[in-house]
Image (cartoon, rainbow, N blue to C red):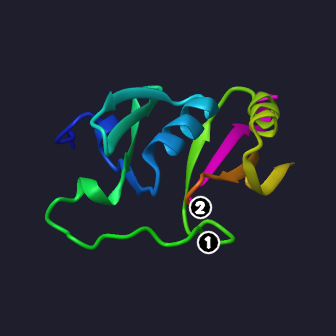
Amino acid sequence: MSGYVDPTEQLVTEILVRDIRRSVDFYTRLGFELLRDGGDFVELTWEDHRLFLAEPSAFHEVGDADVAAPPRFPLANVRVMVPNVDDCWRRVNEIGARIVVPIADRYYGLRDFTVADPDGFGVRFASTLDAR
């Protein structure tokens, strides 16, 4: 079955954020690239895959959209596969990201860890164990 659109345009996550500048800074420091800046809506990329960030003001039809306080543990996360997760681990420690799951080798064949963005959404970096 052929896809309707390129696979990198499917299942794109959009995260509602309280302060888009702070969030863009966080994600670009992690290694994401800024593709498009629409003010209260931005598109980030990682290897041609997109991640959207939006402030409540981006939803013009919804007058009272609000962002809840960050949860203690992310309700969801996006996984980013990288060749050397230990390099990413050093980076997140250097920038002071909030670590919610420390780095370790996992039973499911990955070495990974999870950090929370400023609004509590999780970003999990992982490498396959056989790649080490």
Q: Amino acid at mark 2?
A: Gly
Q: Is residue 67 something one can see in this rendering?
A: yes
- Mark 2 secondary-structure assignment: loop
Dot 1: within a 10 Å radius of its alpha carbon, few (fewer than 14), some, or many (20 or more) residues? Answer: few
Dot 2: within a 10 Å radius of its alpha carbon, few (fewer than 14), some, or many (20 or more) residues? Answer: many
The reply to whether discs 1 and 2 touch (Cβ–Cβ < 8 Å) is yes
Residue drawn at point x = 55 percent, y = 71 percent: 69
1 or 2: tag closer to the N-terminus: 1
Does 100 lie within the magenta span? no
**Seen in the image, is 31 located left or right of residue 51?**
right
**Seen in the image, is 130 located left or right of residue 29?**
right
Residue 93 vs 18, above or below: the answer is: above
The quarter of the image holding the C terminus is: top right
Residue wearing tag 2: 120
Residue drawn at point x = 21 percent, y = 43 percent: 1
Residue 21 x %, y %: 47, 40
Specify the label residue 40 is tagged with.
none
Residue 6 x %, y %: 26, 33
The range drawn in magenta is 121-132
Residue wearing tag 1: 71
- Mark 1 secondary-structure assignment: loop
Residue 57 x %, y %: 27, 57
Residue 125 x %, y %: 67, 42
**Seen in the image, is 90 located left or right of residue 77?**
right
Q: Is residue 106 something one can see in this rendering?
A: no
Residue drawn at point x = 35 percent, y = 39 percent: 42
Residue drawn at point x = 74 percent, y = 53 percent: 98
Q: Amino acid at mark 1?
A: Pro
Distance from the alpha carbon under mark 1 to that under mark 2? 6 Å
Residue 41 vs 102, above or below: the answer is: above
How many numbered callouts?
Answer: 2
